[in-house]
Image: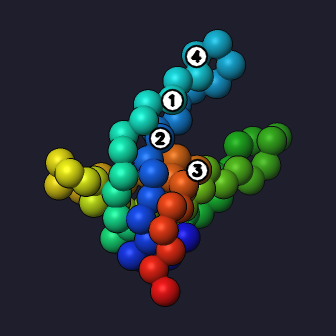
Amino acid sequence: MRVGDLVNITEKRGTGEFYVETPLGIGLVLDIKKTDDLMFGSIGPVNLGNEVTVHLCPSGEVARYIDRSLEVINVEE
């Protein structure tokens, strides 16, 4: 995924019985920020994914999502 890619956004939250997917539509990737690993005691380092800033179409809203919530549908070359 790169800046300028067109993506399908499906917000994913929770786990198991409480897992919910919310389709949010299509957006344009504006920025990608690498996130640091989180340290959880005896579990060790956990990476939640990169933070991606997206311009939502057609609402015009700008929001941030973790890269796992995004699916690239058109790659800018």
Whole-Å distance between the Cαs marked 3 and 4? 18 Å
Q: Is residue 31 visible?
A: no
Could you say where residue 4 lies in the image, as x and y percent from the top left? 39, 76
Residue 46 lies left or right of residue 14; in this view the side is right
Residue highlighted by disc 1: 21
Q: Are marks 3 and 4 in contact (CB under 8 Å)?
A: no
Q: Dividing the picture into quarters, in which one does residue 53 lie?
A: bottom left
Question: Which is more foreground, mark 4 or mark 2?
Answer: 2
Q: Dividing the picture into quarters, in which one does residue 23 lie?
A: top left
Residue at image point 64% right, 13% down: 17
Residue highlighted by disc 2: 10
Residue highlighted by disc 3: 68
Furthest residue in direction top, as rendered: 17
Answer with mark 4 or mark 2, whichever residue precedes in sequence.
2
Whole-Å distance between the Cαs marked 4 and 1? 10 Å
Q: Is residue 65 visible?
A: yes
Identity, as a three-letter code, of the amino acid under mark 4: Phe
Q: Are marks 3 and 1 in contact (CB under 8 Å)?
A: no
Furthest residue in direction left, as rendered: 60
Identity, as a three-letter code, of the amino acid under mark 3: Arg
Answer with mark 3 or mark 2, whichever residue precedes in sequence.
2
Answer with mark 3 or mark 4, whichever residue precedes in sequence.
4
Secondary element type, mark 2? strand
Position of residue 72 relative to residue 45, above or below, is below
Answer with mark 3 or mark 1, whichever residue precedes in sequence.
1
Q: Are marks 4 and 2 in contact (CB under 8 Å)?
A: no
Identity, as a three-letter code, of the amino acid under mark 2: Thr
Furthest residue in direction right, as rendered: 42
Residue highlighted by disc 4: 18
Query: Looking at the image, how many numbered discs can be counted on the residues?
Result: 4
Secondary element type, mark 1? strand
